[in-house]
Amino acid sequence: MKQSKTPSAARATKVDAMPMTSKKEASTQDPSAATSATSITVGLDLGDRHSHFCVLDACGRPLEQGRVAMSPAELTAFFLRFGSARLILEVGGQSPWVSRLAQAAGMEVLVANPRRVQLITRNERKNDRTDAELLARLGRVDPQLLSPVTHRSVEHQADLAVKRARDAAVASRTALINHVRGAIKSFGHRLPTCSPDSFHTRVMARLPVELAPALRPIVRLISQVTVEIKNFDAQIEELADERYPVTKALRQVSGVGPVTALSFVLTLDNPGRVSDSRQVGPYLGLVPRTHDSGASSPQLRITKAGDPGLRRLLVIAANRILGPFGPDCDLKRFGLRLAAQGGKNGRKRAKVAVARKLAVLLHHLWKTGEVYDPFHLAKKRGEAVPA
């Protein structure tokens, strides 16, 4: 095998392209001369500083393997070599900007869902080079095996970053509050129950003398984080009102506020991402797994596919709908019936089921723009509804 330097920073290795071609003849061939054909498939295993790639011809024979630097200039030069070839890569932190760069260079880009390529994750001899080759081979044979993911637009990705920054701030505040409560409990004291927003004002005067030097700075930090969370809330509400007016239709449903509505719209990106509103449940991982075999049909947990942040918000909204402050509606009646029949874990199952129905409802309102009727199903069944 002979090493050859490419014009860019990419390090590549040319391999035998034809069974009857000698290694010397194969090393003098220029694989880029054949990259204008749409039958070329490129697998790219993304890394932090470098990404490994594998180029296959129409028959699945390796033309070139190597690595390329993870910089916009080097990647652009690499993508331009292969014209309209098919590029396969996995979802990851850097896949959005890399996929956009490849599409701008004219490539057909398929972003593989990692839940569908366990052939890679469970490979007993896993490394970046073999990962790139497996991606290329899977994408060459049947792209549908990869369950391709479509990344959202740059604008939606930037707006969603605001919501995720809020999530990070809320998680940090929760960890700090738990630290304060745990430290005080270890000294035999207990703090009063209160909301996270009012925690810093209720607690400061109740700190034990011996713990005050250690916990006062933490309580002040909680106060600062609470202020930033409120700023994020105002920013999200402004985004929802001005740039995503469709969220107003979603916020007709009790328990759905600006954060949940905006997260729903930005995560799905457009209502046409799923063909039918009922497919939103599987898309967000709110449906049970199935492992049926013969007469065996066990009851399994939900798949938890899709965005975990949106799934958590939908479950929180469902919990509010089912709670004592949730107004009477079709969703609440459905959930309470299910909870009454579900036995020990009935309440948990009811929350997930209501979250799934809520996702279907939100998608329907988004797609149709209809006015929300909280008793639509009850009226069809002839049930009593409030005047």
Image: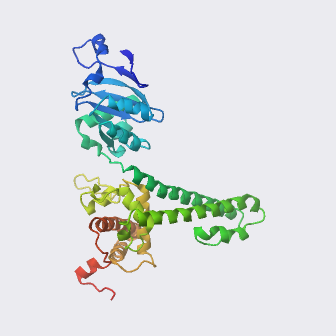
Residue 97 image position (x, y, % from top left): 40, 42
Furthest residue in direction right, as rendered: 209
* The quadrant where residue 148 appears: top left
Q: Residue at x 62, y 62 (%)?
A: 177
Image side of residue 19 versus residue 68, left or right? left
Question: In the rendered image, is residue 121 in sight?
Answer: yes
* The quadrant where residue 5 appears: top left
Q: Quadrant of the C terminus?
A: bottom left
Residue 323 image position (x, y, % from top left): 44, 75
Image side of residue 15 versus residue 75, left or right? left
Q: Residue at x 73, y 70 (%)?
A: 205
For the image, the number of numbered tags is 0
Vertical comparison of 156 with 366: above or below = above
Residue 34 image position (x, y, % from top left): 25, 24
* The quadrant where residue 59 appears: top left
Q: Residue at x 30, y 10 (%)?
A: 24
Q: Nearer the viewer, residue 157 or 113?
A: 157
Q: Nearer the viewer, residue 367 or 182?
A: 367
